[in-house]
Amino acid sequence: MSTRLLRLLAVVLAALAITASAATAQTITGRISGTIADTSGGVLPGVAITVLEEGTGFTQTTVTDERGAYVLVNLPLGNYKVTAELQGFKPMARTGYVLQADGRITADFKMEVGQL
């Protein structure tokens, strides 16, 4: 084989190796999603959802949609606390959610009516 052909072959093999390693790399984020309802099962739109990564203090917030659903994506890995708040309802918080690489956590809540 000529030197030129050997160089071309080396470049092609290097490109394939890089592509293969990138394709097998794990995602280093995850997502938390859920549905918020009242104690009778009626969905609650407009609930403020906050996730807190307890080790770093990273937070992200969203609001539930008309189906009472929410999703937070591209969250860094770690241990999370999830809170749900809506005027007229008792705020709720849960800890102990461990988000791992490409993890998907479901955090549903049933909120109780609070003092108006």
Image: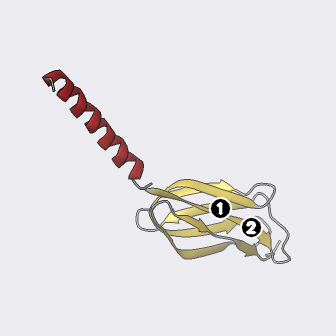
> Amino acid under label 1?
Ile
Residue at the left extreme, as displayed: 3
Residue 45 is situated, as x and y percent measured from the top left of the image, at 79, 59
Q: Residue at x 16, y 27 (%)?
A: 1
Q: Residue at x 82, y 66 (%)?
A: 43
Residue 37 is situated, as x and y percent measured from the top left of the image, at 79, 70
User: Mark 2–mark 1 contact, CB under 8 Å?
Assistant: yes
**Mark 1 residue element:** strand
Q: Decide which of 14, 30 is in the foreground and name it.
A: 14
Nearer the observer: mark 2 or 1; the answer is 2
Q: Which mark is residue 36?
A: 2
Q: Which mark is residue 28?
A: none
Query: Horizontal placement of 51 versus 40: left or right?
Result: left
Q: CA distance from mark 2 to mark 1?
A: 9 Å
Mark 1 = which residue?
A: 49
Q: Is residue 15 above or below residue 35?
A: above
Q: Report which quarter residue 110 is drawn in.
A: bottom right
Query: Horizontal placement of 17 versus 78: left or right?
Result: left
